């Protein structure tokens, strides 16, 4: 949860702390739909896409494998793989 509107500047540090404490294989990217749809800058159809790009724009000190785990890999471990 962020105390700010997109691009949620306070979430970056929280994410770094979570990954440091638990590892990227135990952190999962998620959305808070429909809540971010109401006032998202580029409209509701882009809310998920732009929010998921934040992980890369923040330039976190994470490997490509860690970013993959956070965005998709951890969920696939829990729920099974899905088509690309």
Image (cartoon, rainbow, N blue to C red):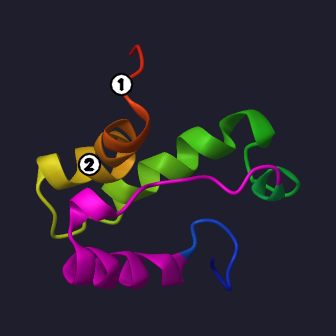
Position above or below: 25 against 50: below
Helix, strand, or loop for circle 1? loop
The structure residue drawn at horizontal position 37% and vertical position 57%, both measured from the top left corner, is 55
The structure residue drawn at horizontal position 55% and vertical position 52%, both measured from the top left corner, is 51
| Distance between the alpha carbons at the discs numbered 2 and 1 | 12 Å
x, y percent for residue 31:
62, 52
Position above or below: 81 against 53: above
In the image, the segment drawn in magenta is 9-34
In screen coordinates, is 15 left or right of 43? left
In screen coordinates, is 17 left or right of 36? left
Contact, mark 2 vs mark 1 (Cβ under 8 Å):
no
The residue indicated by pointer 1 is 81
Residue 46 lies in the magenta stretch: no
Helix, strand, or loop for circle 2? helix
Q: Which mark is residue 69?
A: 2
Residue 26 lies in the magenta stretch: yes
The structure residue drawn at horizontal position 26% and vertical position 48%, both measured from the top left corner, is 69
Q: Nearer the viewer, residue 16 or 43?
A: 16
Q: Which of 76 and 8 is in front in this view?
A: 76
- Badge 2: few (under 14), some or many (20 or more) residues near its Cα, within 10 Å? many
């Amino acid at each position: 949860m962020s105390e700010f509107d997109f691009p949620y500047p306070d979430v970056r540090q929280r994410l770094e702390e979570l990954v440091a404490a638990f590892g990227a294989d135990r952190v999962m990217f998620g959305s808070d739909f429909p809540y971010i749809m109401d006032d998202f800058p580029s409209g509701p159809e882009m809310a998920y896409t732009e929010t998921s790009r934040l992980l890369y724009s923040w330039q976190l000190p994470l490997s490509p494998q860690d970013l993959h785990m956070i965005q998709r890999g951890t969920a696939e471990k829990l729920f099974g793989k899905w088509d690309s």
